[in-house]
Amino acid sequence: MLRTVKPKNARSKRAMEARQPKEVEDARIAIFVKGTKTGEVLNGVMKDMMALKRPDAISFSKKNVIHPLDAQNTASGSSSMSSLEFWSSKNDASMFVIGQTSKKRPNDLTFVRMFDGKVLDIVEAGVENYVSMESVPGSKSTPGHKPLMHFASELFDTHPRFIQLKSMLMSLFNGEVVESIYLKGLEHVISVSLAPTPATLNTTTESATPLPKVHIRTYTTRLLASGSRIPRVELTPMGPSMDLVLRRHTNPDPELLKQAMRRPKLKKTDVEKGLGKKRKNLDVDEMGDLRGRVHVGKQDLSRLQTRKMKGLKAGAFEDGGDDGAGDSGSDDDEASNKKRKLS
């Protein structure tokens, strides 16, 4: 358990407030952990998955004795759970990807999802037919861009094991919640499909029938001209590509899952209210900005206080003399001045 630390300055206070629960959470931070033994395949898989997850990814380069799916009464199992909770609280992370290989379970990849500093659920899978990102020629996507995820099977909505896997992959790669999507910002697609499903597979309950393999492929997108506003999209293999074989798993605790699925009621802003219905003297322009019209009573401009000048005072040009007489007098003065200069 981490001890409670009081902030010493405003900067540390803002950092602690950023870790507090929010109405709309930030992107999940994932920690990639190496087990006691990892081979070349797992090292490449974790490296490529980190490239897709950046910048919300943390790598633990040292080897760790961690077995989260072992029995809770064993020393290794209890220490692994406490280590995950400690790392989650210290790094503000809610996802773990653990790589470990053994004779019994080669190229084993374990996904761990956290909630409120506790382990929510775990999915274990074996990696097969791995193709690295470096071995695939062509351009790569920009780190930090939100991917488009495609799940091509009905089992992702009906079978409990694949529903859990879909939710786990969505939590890992989904990124930040956005209100609108910029078409050119979709640079890569993560496609998840299944091998042919056995006829004896029960789609509603978990059975002992071997589950079909999961195919994960990653593509970059190219927007080409189509003669209309909607461009034609081409997919080019980017890598990595791999097949996953589902192994062990743990179901989430019902009470903890209920708290994790709870959604707070968001506060509606004035802009959202203006977009929802027409209100008097309020309008929303094309950019989504709310504009209001203010009505002011009739003003008497004759009483408006302005700059005080002699020329603007009443009666400044009112005098008893004639304008023509004044002009002739000025001409006589000019003539007398000329005579003086000549003399």
Image (cartoon, rainbow, N blue to C red):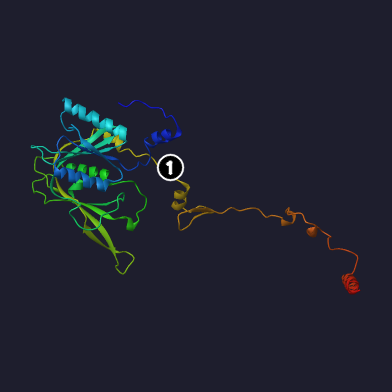
Q: Mark 1 points at which residue?
A: 267
Q: Is residue 320 above or below residue 100?
A: below
Residue 130 vs residue 219: left or right? Answer: left
How many other residues sit within 10 Å of disc 1, few (<14), some (14-19) or many (≥20)?
few
- Provide residue 75's location: percent of width, then percent of height: 17, 25
Q: Which of 206 and 229 is in front in this view?
A: 229
- Provide residue 198's location: percent of width, then percent of height: 9, 48
- Provide residue 123's location: percent of width, then percent of height: 18, 39
Q: How many labels does the image show?
A: 1
Q: Quadrant of residue 336?
A: bottom right
Task: Look at 27% across and 30% down and name the residue there.
Answer: 86
User: In this rendering, does residue 90 appear at all?
Assistant: yes
Q: The residue under label 1 is which amino acid type?
A: Lys
Q: Nearer the viewer, residue 200 or 217?
A: 217
Q: In which quarter of the image is the N terminus?
A: top left
Task: Look at 9% across and 43% down and name the residue there.
Answer: 210
Task: Look at 65% across and 53% down and name the residue there.
Answer: 297
Q: In this view, does 323 lie above or below 240?
A: below
Mark 1, secondary structure of its residue:
loop
Residue 58 vs residue 129: left or right? Answer: right
- Provide residue 194's location: percent of width, then percent of height: 15, 50
Task: Look at 91% across and 71% down and name the residue there.
Answer: 340
